[in-house]
Image (spheres, rainbow, N blue to C red):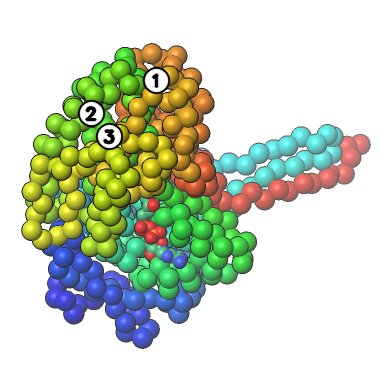
Amino acid sequence: MTARAVVPGNHEALDGRTLPVEDPSTGTVIAHVARGGAAEVDRAVAATRAATRTMRDSLPLERGRALRRLAVEVDAAAEDLARLESLDTGKPLSLARREVAGCVGYLDYYAGAAGTLQGDTIPLGPGTLAWTVPEPVGVSAHIVPWNAPLSMLCRSVAPALAAGNTAVVKPAELTPLTALRFADLVAAAGFPAGAYEVVTGLGAEAGAALAAHGGIGSLTFTGSVDTGRAVLRAAAEHVTPVVTELGGKSPQIVFADADLDEVARQVVLGFTANSGQYCDAGSRVLVDRAVAADLVERIRVRAGALTLGAGADDPDLGPMVSAQHRRRVTDYVDLGRAEGADAPTPPQALPTVGHFVAPTVFTAVTPTMRIAREEIFGPVLAVLEFGTEAEALDLADATDYGLGVGIHTADVDRALRVADRVDAGYVMVNDYFAGGPAVPFGGTKLSGTGRERGLVALESYLTRKTVVVRRAPCT
Ligand code: NAD
């Protein structure tokens, strides 16, 4: 693609403006996309509104079949999509392939779920009957982040379509390419024109206009806490219901009876997968003091052996998504040292081009340090030590976030006790990143509101109409 080309399939901005899209593995521009704003959002919402009647009147099983066809289309295009995602985000090709397979999983799951929509009947005594009917919200809006673009998109668009809605998507300006390619696949699967529209552009322009739009019936926002707040404020104008999936500072809690070699493997996966750019990255380890030195040694050996490189070369770690984000992460590494925490220089030599950060493991971390409390969104781990289970719980809850928690122990009672008490939305015992499309996911505190995945996610794209009928009395 030349630097002047606009990605095929992307609606042009009405004023012809474009944005460059970069390959973060090399820093070179690989495409240009339309720089949409309020006018383009109006156009997309109007197009999707025109299709809401068709979607709403379709039989749930028909929608399920269309989602199944879409799953087949995505699966058939999986290698192209994975290569595009890897190029656009810098993520290793194998990881991009797994994320595309995850999208197929969301589409398959919600294809089956479409036919499960039901209401309730409520007995109100002789002669009076009440029932509820699930109804689509109409146009569902989705603002998507850059860290797992197609995966996050499918996670919310699949249940929205299953529930009988249309969808307008605003992908992140850094990584818009797979959302555009997905539009072709939605059309090929036989969804009506206008069922899925994409507006590319900047968050402050296209994203803000979509969040504030009066024509949308729901908004799903996945991204940072600050933007989440802005989106909630904008949506308040029209009292639009919002699902927010925000950041995290997720701990892996390691008790002394755990299998330390397996824990070290999971900890390293937890803080380095996608170069640490996952909302539920296990970016803190809380470890029993008795085994802390042993565990840290195992973690450092494993982390030091990881390879860094361009996404297409399929290393263990790709680059940060942008030069700006790399600076943010390395500023946190400098801050950790300035705060008095200890991290040896990682052994890896960084590639000479691209936005790379090597996996960095901090010890001598205290709970009040910023590197222990703030989301870094890079391959940086903070290790904190505890003496008792109660201290472990206090440390786990000592941030403003409440997304993922990993618990590692051979003691089932202890695992269930900690799972009950910890303040978080998603707890994984002895298997970090366990889950799938059927398993609800979301956070507490600043990590967000609402749940995605599972049948419960359908509720974010439905209203429940209640009908109460009084019949003539029986004679
Ligand atoms: P971001 O908030 O900068 O951007 C997210 C999206 O919001 C982008 O599409 C962006 O263009 C748009 N946006 C920016 N400003 C906007 C505005 N004023 N109005 C409307 N939209 C606007 O987040 P990011 O940096 O792309 O993503 C990283 C963050 O996302 C991290 O904090 C991460 O934890 C979080 N995240 C959470 C989950 C989850 O499920 N909880 C999943 C993935 C990422």
Which residue corresponds to mark 1?
Answer: 387
Q: In x, y percent, where is residue 24?
A: 19, 61
The disc placed on residue 363 is 3
| For marks 2 and 3 on the same chain, the one whose residue lies earlier in the sequence | 2
**Vertical arrangement, residue 420 with respect to residue 208, above or below:** above
Residue 267 locus on image (x, y percent)? 27, 32
Question: Which residue is at a point 36% across and 71% down the rendered structure image?
Answer: 201
Name the image quarter holding the N terminus: bottom left
Residue visible at 67% across and 45% down in the picture: 132
Ligand 1: which quarter? bottom left
Q: Is residue 281 left or right of residue 416?
A: left
Residue 155's spot in the image, x, y percent?
39, 48
Answer with mark 2 or mark 1, whichever residue precedes in sequence.
2
Q: From the viewer's perspective, is the residue at label 2 or at label 3 nearer?
A: 3
What kind of residue is marked 2? Val
Q: Which residue is mark 2?
A: 296
Tag 1, which secondary structure? Answer: loop
Between the residue at mark 2 and the residue at mark 3, the CA separation in whole angstroms equals 8 Å
- Decide: marks 2, 3 in contact (CB < 8 A)? yes
Reply above or below: 303 against 179.
Answer: above
